Amino acid sequence: MTGDDKSKAGANGGPVIILVEPQLGENIGMVARAMANFGLAELRLVSPRDGWPSEKARAAASKADHVIDGVTVFEDLQAALADLNFVMATTARQRDGFKRVAGPVEAGQTLRRRVRAGERTGILFGRERFGLYNEEVALADEIVTFPVNPEFASLNIAQAVLLMSYEWMKSGLAAETDTAFSAPEVVPAEKEHLHGLLAHLEAALDARGYFRPAAKKPKMLDNLRAVLTRPGFGLSEIKVLRGVVSSLDYFSPRQPRGAGYPDRKAEVDEALHGDGDYRRKPAVLKGEDGND
């Protein structure tokens, strides 16, 4: 990657990810994938053990080829950091010295603020086995550490990059609760549709002797209304419920759907319309099958 290419990569607003002496190509590939997940593109390697390029890294990157293709390799850490204005070093161990220490949330916000101010930033990650040497941490401006279990503090390098990449992405959201997509908006159904459902349910339960003893029917209906009015159903949800009630009310194992015009449906239609000629008509009213 040329100097101009590096400037273009940095212009996307993302910090550079620097891996010091990474050992396995597979780990480098998983780092590239984690970066791509959260919009980071520039990856630098300092003396990778197995050399570069690496087909194992490309395979593990799972189509994050733009990150793999843009990798630059350096012989020493100072050269890898030379063009950066601000660098954070990740570590799980307490270090001697006077470096400011931040958690990942604060680190993401700090990086975002500095990038918006036009600075070139980077995040430094150490070796898979033991991380960074003290003299390498000393080259960074601040330390970032994760709130992990102190009895098992070591993170896989790709996991560590994923956490910081996520915090970088999150720091750019208008609100931390923003998501990539949301549930469809449900407009509450008009009361007439809810009343229709309740009336249908009452008739179906009446036909099956649910309201026993009869004196308790008003209270039982109040309980049903309380349950069904609480969720704030949308019209499509009301239709689904009407379809369920219709199947339970009109059809039975003896007269299942598709077996003709059921007796119970004929009885209801006769009560509603009274012309005695409903057996030739469709067995489902519009809007009662959960699909219309």
Image (cartoon, rainbow, N blue to C red):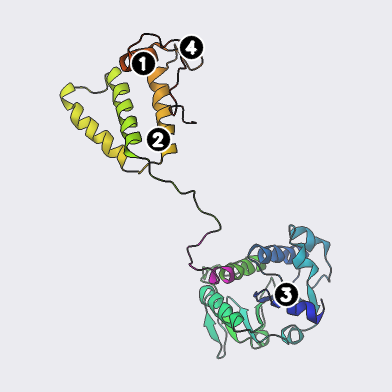
What residue is disc 1 on? Answer: 269
User: Hey, which quadrant is residue 189 in on the image?
Assistant: top left
Mark 2 to mark 3: distance in Å? 52 Å
Task: Tell me, yes or no, if residue 85 can be seen here.
Answer: yes
Q: Which residue is mark 3?
A: 9
Sequence order check, earlier mark of 3 and 4: 3
Q: Which residue is mark 2?
A: 238
- Give the Cα distance between marks 1 and 4: 15 Å
Tell me: residue 27, above or below residue 86: above
- What is the crowding at mark 4: few (fewer than 14 residues within 10 Å), some, or many (at least 20)? few
Measure the alpha-carbon separation of dots 2 and 1: 21 Å
| Pick the front one: 259 or 168 | 259
1 vs 4, front mark: 1
**Does any portion of residue 47 appear in the rendered image?**
no
Give the mark, 1 or 3, whose residue is nearer the N terminus: 3
Closer to the chain start, of discs 2 and 1, is 2
Q: Is 178 inside the magenta-drawn segment?
A: yes
Q: Amino acid at mark 1?
A: Asp
In the rendering, at what x and y percent does residue 268 appear? 34, 16
Q: Which residue is mark 4?
A: 260
